Image (cartoon, rainbow, N blue to C red):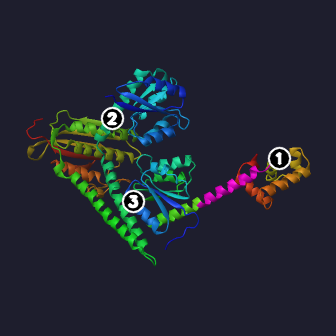
């Protein structure tokens, strides 16, 4: 049984387009079927109709030029594998396109059947890998809070608007009871929807859902730092890792604890960003510590050189919805603390000797492990 | 209190991927007597043949596929000039600035006050009506202008620049009497009541006076 791979070619030069079509003609298992369009706008419409597996894209089109072409494709088809076609002279553009978000590029003059099919299959596989990685990527606390806010806000907006509509249907000399009734029914529905969202979040945060497996906290720190790296570079924050190699494994939900570290790192970075002067340094430390009753444990500290926190706010900083950031939700630290406490640890903050704040937490080592 | 909107009933096109918000907005707008059509995606709206009908758009910023701001951009490119009101669940200031700069009438954050949306919709509909009248007027003027002979167009161009007949005759290398004739004919064909009227028409047409 022969498989089909549907290729959309967006290319304004008929000669180049013919070359590609010729090269892929008669392929089997998989059979590459090429559809050719000459303009980006038509191509985007075609993509929206579905059924395309991979896109061959010339960046210089009558209705779009350069990386903007790729950006337009990404805006309307974020999950589409893309191979950029380039001439020999603009190869640099193609490389930049791959750095931006294309999966591969091809120089047209070298695009024979072998090179083309290899590149198309590679792009499909690479995109699949990227998507899987993205799905596995943990949300930062900020993202999580924002998505919760959005989820609850939608039904809330519908409730408010329906209520106002109902009032208007009821006003005047001849109230329209039927319309008002329908609006009221929608209000009740949306109220239930909002409360379901809350229930889902509660279930998500429940202790019972904790994965409990031994893992190396340093690896979780490394992963969190990798996720935060882009943000740190953007904020011109220098990151120093000071991780002990002698740590015992800890037990718990690695993803959740990774989120805690990520959250502390992002907080530190935000604190540094909001200060104009001074060093812009963030230090993440891990080391051994003795826990209650002499049980061994690990300590993770995130030390920033930011503005620190006012004395009167020290007590409130772990409260839900307390924030000093302009756009913060005030969920990060309170959620972090409850995650750490669920793992039998503690999370607290201390002002630094000089500038900034250190937020640290402890976790008990796995029982029976020796460091 | 149902507000009355006369002539060629304008339509409010609502594009929001959340069915519940869509229904609520539809009900609210209908409760004041507006006619409403709703869509779940930008694509759906774009492929609707009535999308250039008189009226305005109420657009969610965050849409699957083509987003609200991108739709605004695409509509401008296609020369579909319906005024747009944005509604959003997560409005930030840079985003709203971008939308307003690109010509949006209003940028409302969900949940919004009903009166704010209704006011914005009324304003958008008026704006659309005025723009349509203007476009129709210019199209009419252009048609009249194209009915002028090339020489009449030339004379009109110089007249509206304020040149006296004598100077126009000099510029075009013809007699003053001929200029007077062309001048009278252009005023007549443009259906201008006076010279001032003719100048206003030339301004609306944009180009010929500046040649």
Q: CA distance from mark 2 to mark 3?
A: 34 Å
Q: CA distance from mark 3 to mark 1?
A: 60 Å
Task: Give the labeled residue for mark 3.
Answer: B21
Any part of residue B111 in sight? no
Query: Residue placed at 24% from the left, 49% from the top?
Result: A336
Q: Quadrant of the N terminus of chain A?
A: top left
Tell me if mark 1 has few (under 14), some (14-19) or many (20+) residues whose alpha carbon lies within 10 angstroms of its own. Answer: some
Q: Chain of mark 1?
A: B
Looking at the magenta stretch, what is its main secondary structure?
Answer: helix
* Camera-side residue of B75 and B159: B75
Tell me the subunit letter for badge 3.
B
Q: Tell me the element at label 2.
A: helix
Q: Which residues are magenta?
A: B129-150
Do the residues at pointers 2 and 1 share their chain? no
Q: Nearer the viewer, residue A367 or A59?
A: A59
Q: Secondary structure at mark 3?
A: helix
Q: Secondary structure at mark 1?
A: helix
Residue that mark 1 sits on: B151
Q: Where does the image place residue B181, in percent across and percent down from the top left?
A: 87, 53
Vertically, is A238 above or below B147? Answer: above
Residue at the spot of label 2:
A128
């Amino acid at each position: 049984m022969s498989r089909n791979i549907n290729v959309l070619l967006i290319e304004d030069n008929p000669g180049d387009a013919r070359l590609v079509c010729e090269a892929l003609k008669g392929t089997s298992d998989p059979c590459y079927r090429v559809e050719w369009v000459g303009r980006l706008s038509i191509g985007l419409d075609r993509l929206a109709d579905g059924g395309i597996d991979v896109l061959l894209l010339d960046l210089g089109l009558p209705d779009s030029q350069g990386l903007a072409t790729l950006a337009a494709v990404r805006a309307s088809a974020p999950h589409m594998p893309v191979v950029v076609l380039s001439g020999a002279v603009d190869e640099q553009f193609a490389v930049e396109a791959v750095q931006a978000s294309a999966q591969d590029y091809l120089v047209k003059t070298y695009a024979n059947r072998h090179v083309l099919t290899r590149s198309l299959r590679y792009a499909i596989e690479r995109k699949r890998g990227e998507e899987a990685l993205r799905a596995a990527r943990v949300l930062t606390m900020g993202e999580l809070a924002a998505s919760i806010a959005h989820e609850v806000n939608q039904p809330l907006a519908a409730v408010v608007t329906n209520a106002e509509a109902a009032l208007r249907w009821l006003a005047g000399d001849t109230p329209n009871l039927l319309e008002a009734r329908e609006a009221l029914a929608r209000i009740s529905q949306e109220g239930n929807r909002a409360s379901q969202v809350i229930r889902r979040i509660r279930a998500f945060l429940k202790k019972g859902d904790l994965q409990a497996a031994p893992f190396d906290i340093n690896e979780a720190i490394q992963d969190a730092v990798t996720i935060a790296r882009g943000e740190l570079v953007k904020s011109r924050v220098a990151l120093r890792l000071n991780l002990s190699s002698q740590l015992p494994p800890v037990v718990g939900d690695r993803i959740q604890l990774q989120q805690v570290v990520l959250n502390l790192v992002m907080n530190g970075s935000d604190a540094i960003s909001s200060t104009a002067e001074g060093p812009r340094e963030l230090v993440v430390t891990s080391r051994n510590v003795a826990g209650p009753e002499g049980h061994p444990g690990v300590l993770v500290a995130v030390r920033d050189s930011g503005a620190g926190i006012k004395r009167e706010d020290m007590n409130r900083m772990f409260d839900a919805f307390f924030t000093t950031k302009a756009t913060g939700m005030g969920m990060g630290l309170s959620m972090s603390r409850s995650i750490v406490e669920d793992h039998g640890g503690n999370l607290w903050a201390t002002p630094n000797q000089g500038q900034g704040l250190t937020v640290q937490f402890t976790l008990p080592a796995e029982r029976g492990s020796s460091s | 209190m149902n507000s009355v909107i006369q002539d060629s009933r304008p339509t409010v096109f609502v594009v929001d991927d959340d069915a519940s918000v869509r229904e609520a907005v539809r009900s609210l707008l209908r409760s004041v007597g507006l006619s409403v059509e709703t869509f779940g995606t930008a694509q759906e709206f774009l492929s609707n043949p009535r999308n250039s009908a008189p009226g305005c758009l109420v657009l969610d910023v965050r849409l699957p596929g083509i987003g609200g701001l991108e739709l605004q951009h695409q509509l401008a490119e296609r020369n579909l000039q319906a005024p747009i009101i944005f509604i959003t669940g997560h409005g930030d200031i840079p985003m709203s600035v971008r939308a307003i700069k690109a010509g949006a009438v209003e940028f409302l954050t969900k949940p919004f006050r009903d009166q704010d949306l209704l006011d914005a919709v009324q304003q958008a509909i008026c704006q659309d009506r005025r723009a349509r009248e203007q476009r129709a007027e210019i199209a009419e003027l252009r048609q009249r202008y194209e009915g002028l002979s090339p020489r009449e167009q030339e004379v009109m161009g110089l007249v509206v620049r304020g040149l006296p007949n004598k100077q126009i005759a000099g510029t075009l290398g013809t007699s003053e009497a001929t200029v007077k004739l062309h001048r009278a004919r252009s005023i007549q064909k443009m259906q201008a009541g006076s010279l001032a009227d003719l100048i206003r028409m030339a301004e609306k047409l944009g180009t010929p006076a500046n040649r």
